[in-house]
């Protein structure tokens, strides 16, 4: 996924407006096709050369071009109800882009998926991810996924535990005896019968049986990594918020199917080699 910079968003929205106006037979005062493309190229070159003052100047040019096209389209469709309804989503996104600032919340990061949010990861190699939060629930022993749910609005991790446990109990038809979570779930909203154990650094004062389960909690991290890389959880092609929820569940089901197929193939190989190298007495 391309990183959603302001310059790219301005340029892409102007292209969409010009294309839609051409399809509807609306003659614009100016399309800024060549000027906007040239400014986008120069902005990236200036930013790469660390000439940020020149780069910001090109961004302002791109914003001006998009704003002029937005206002021109508004004037041309003002007297036609059908055209106003057709251009309403694009014009709304245009006004959002013109008004939003760097420190605002609820910014627009994607034109084809306006529900995308910026999630701060707190990691040096990848500071941000764009999409929505997904809660993964696995079994403690075999790491089978029993719950996968997408949450929009960038909620606090602890406030997703109650819904995640309700979904796991509904899908897997079981009641957990203990729940092991990371430190992001401190201050959770779960009020069920199971006890919630939050992972912590100092484990010397914890009894050995509980210490093993707290260490076992880390096994969910490679599960999430495999679901992102092998199960395509990191890129969703289904539209809308409902598509995010469906994609999360499908990725969880795909992870379980891969585990079952791997176990079945291992069982076949063992039976094959066991029969092939049977000792023969003579």
Image (cartoon, rainbow, N blue to C red):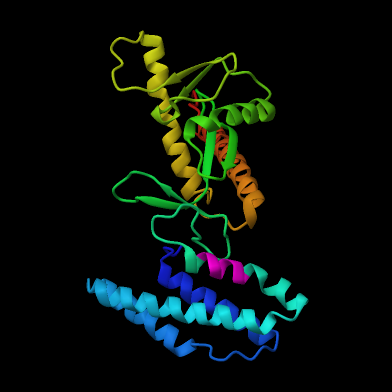
Q: Is residue 255 left or right of residue 88?
A: left
The residues colored magenta run 90-96
In-front residue for pair 38/176: 38
Figure check: 207 above or below 225: above
Place of residue 212 in the rendered image (x, y in percent of width and height, measured from the top left): 38, 17
Kindly identify the residue that appears in the image at 36 percent across and 8 percent down: 207
Q: Is residue 137 left or right of residue 5?
A: right
Image quarter of residue 213: top left
Place of residue 190 in the rendered image (x, y in percent of width and height, measured from the top left): 55, 22
Place of residue 272 in the rendered image (x, y in percent of width and height, measured from the top left): 55, 36
In-front residue for pair 99/251: 99
Magenta-colored segment: predominant secondary structure: helix
Image quarter of residue 149: top right
Kindly identify the residue that appears in the image at 51 percent across and 74 percent down: 12
Q: Is residue 155 left or right of residue 22?
A: left
Kindly identify the residue that appears in the image at 53 percent across and 55 percent down: 116
Kindly identify the residue that appears in the image at 57 percent across and 55 percent down: 115
Q: Is residue 95 magenta?
A: yes
In-front residue for pair 70/246: 70
């Amino acid at each position: 996924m391309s990183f959603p910079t302001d310059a790219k968003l301005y340029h892409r929205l102007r292209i969409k407006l010009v294309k839609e106006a051409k399809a509807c037979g609306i003659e614009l005062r100016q399309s800024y096709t060549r000027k906007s493309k040239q400014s986008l190229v120069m902005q990236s070159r200036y930013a790469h050369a660390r000439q940020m003052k020149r780069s910001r100047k090109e961004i302002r040019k791109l914003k001006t071009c998009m704003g002029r096209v937005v206002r021109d389209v508004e004037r041309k469709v003002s007297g036609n109800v059908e055209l106003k309804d057709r251009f309403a989503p694009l014009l709304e996104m245009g006004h959002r882009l013109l008004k939003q600032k760097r420190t605002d919340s609820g910014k627009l990061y994607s034109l084809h998926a306006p529900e995308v949010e910026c999630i701060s990861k707190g990691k040096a190699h990848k500071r941000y991810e764009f999409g929505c939060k997904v809660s993964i629930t696995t079994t403690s022993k075999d790491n089978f996924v029993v719950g996968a749910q997408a949450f929009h609005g960038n909620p606090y991790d602890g406030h997703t535990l109650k819904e995640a446990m309700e979904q796991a109990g509904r899908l897997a038809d079981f009641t957990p005896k203990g729940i092991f979570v990371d430190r992001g779930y401190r201050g959770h909203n779960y009020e069920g019968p199971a006890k919630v154990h939050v992972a912590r650094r100092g484990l010397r004062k914890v009894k050995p049986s509980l210490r093993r389960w707290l260490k076992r909690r880390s096994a969910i991290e490679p599960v999430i990594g495999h679901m992102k890389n092998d199960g395509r959880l990191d890129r969703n092609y289904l539209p809308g918020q409902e598509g995010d929820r469906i994609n999360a569940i499908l990725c969880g089901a795909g992870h379980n199917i891969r585990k079952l197929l791997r176990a079945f193939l291992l069982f076949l190989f063992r039976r094959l080699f066991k029969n092939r190298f049977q000792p023969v007495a003579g």
